Image: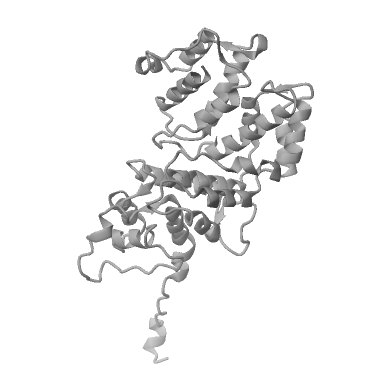
Amino acid sequence: MYIKISLLFCALYFFTAVRSVGLREHQINSCVELSERYKIINNVIPRMRTMTHLMDLGYKMLINFFPSIEIPTTAVINNKTMPQLLINLASVEKEDWIDWEEQNLTTHEVRIFMGMFTIQDKKGVHDGLLTYAELVSLINNDLTLKPDVKGNIKNEFNNGDLINAQKFLAAILKHKPEGKGLDKKQIQICSSLYKFDYDHLPAASLKDLLLKLQIVSNEYDSLLEFEQFQTAANELKELLVLWSEYNKDVDANSPSITSMEVREYLCDFSMYDRNGDGVLNYWEFEPIAHLYMPEYRAMDVLKKYSDLYFTPEIPEFIPISQSYPDIYIGDYWDGKCTMSAAMFLHLKYFLRFERKRLAPKKPKKKSRFLCCYGH
């Protein structure tokens, strides 16, 4: 029964204007509203009230796309099933039209926090609710956040409250840390996980990377092992956001890209990624090259920052003014010479912090006044 309900909600979000993975603020708040608005005995929401709520939210087209979906006449959602439902909603892979600058939780965060919630719930009465004391214990002992962030999350609730999964998730989203962003080394660490021919990011390497972020205590390390459903290229975008927002260690002597700038750049990247495959091919990258580096051939810039050819050394480009044989053959056209989101951040980093510093200095011109007098 609950599998059908999960599919219903997944279908709901698939056919709305929001096409993304993870959970955005209004999606989490909609789940909070649903449970608050239709509270009845045992916190069970019946069929007709759920459908009424969905219609009120503007999801009338759902019935047209899925007329044969059977919604049980008994319970639709209860507190016990909500954590898994939220994970299912976060994990639906949709075309990436997400506004990365809007506050959201990545699929990794939803899985981690809902996993923690469920484990803590099962330590006591497994009813899908945490007492205030259970919540405080979970936050104090198992979330490795700064004390002020922990305090802000706890202050969302009062002693005597019973906290459900969606309220817990909403409180974390409201007070999640901004993080220290990414410096050049960390961008390289993230990009090293991705190769153009990967179906998914390597699970073991991904877990090692998440362990470095120390989001949760050692007791919950198993929650960092995910069933991966996204393509490697699209999962990499979420990883860049997650790393920038939970990153605690940026080289003080190295310039860095803030977490908000990471989101801003991912917005730019997604705008040019017209087919939504998580990488930029030549035709998608060409307008970027003409915009930011018009003095170089777009293909040369793409090759230097492609996941097939990239090396950490500072790239050297061939100016357009120099002639050389036609290079539009081979790997450039077989789909291998593409740019991932991490490589796009590499390019942005180069343009902001390294290009001016590495540019050859022009010789100083002698003063016309001095020249006239033979000095």
Identify whether 323 is placed above or below 298: below
Position of 354 compared to 279: left or right? Answer: right
The residue that appears at 46% across and 13% down in the rendered structure is 55
Kindly indicate the quadrant of the structure image that contains residue 109.
Answer: top right
From the top left corner, tell me how far across and down residue 308 is, in percent: 37, 59
Which residue is more in the foreground, 119 or 178?
119
Q: Residue furthest bottom?
A: 374
The residue that appears at 41% across and 46% down in the rendered structure is 199
Identify whether 188 is placed above or below 35: below
Kindly indicate the quadrant of the structure image that contains residue 155.
Answer: top right
Residue 106 visible in the snapshot = no
How many marks can you see?
0
Position of 248 compared to 58: left or right? Answer: right
The residue that appears at 41% across and 82% down in the rendered structure is 367
Q: How is the image coloured?
A: one colour
From the top left corner, tell me how far across and down residue 86 is, in percent: 55, 28
Which residue is more in the foreground, 261 or 278?
278
Position of 139 compared to 308: left or right? Answer: right
Which residue is more in the foreground, 233 or 118?
118
From the top left corner, tell me how far across and down residue 4 is, in percent: 47, 19
Quarter occupied by the C terminus: bottom left
Kindly indicate the quadrant of the structure image that contains residue 175.
Answer: top right
Residue 316 visible in the snapshot = yes
Identify whether 375 is placed above or below 262: below
Identify whether 291 is placed above or below 155: below
From the top left corner, tell me how far across and down residue 337 is, in percent: 32, 56
Q: Residue furthest left?
A: 326
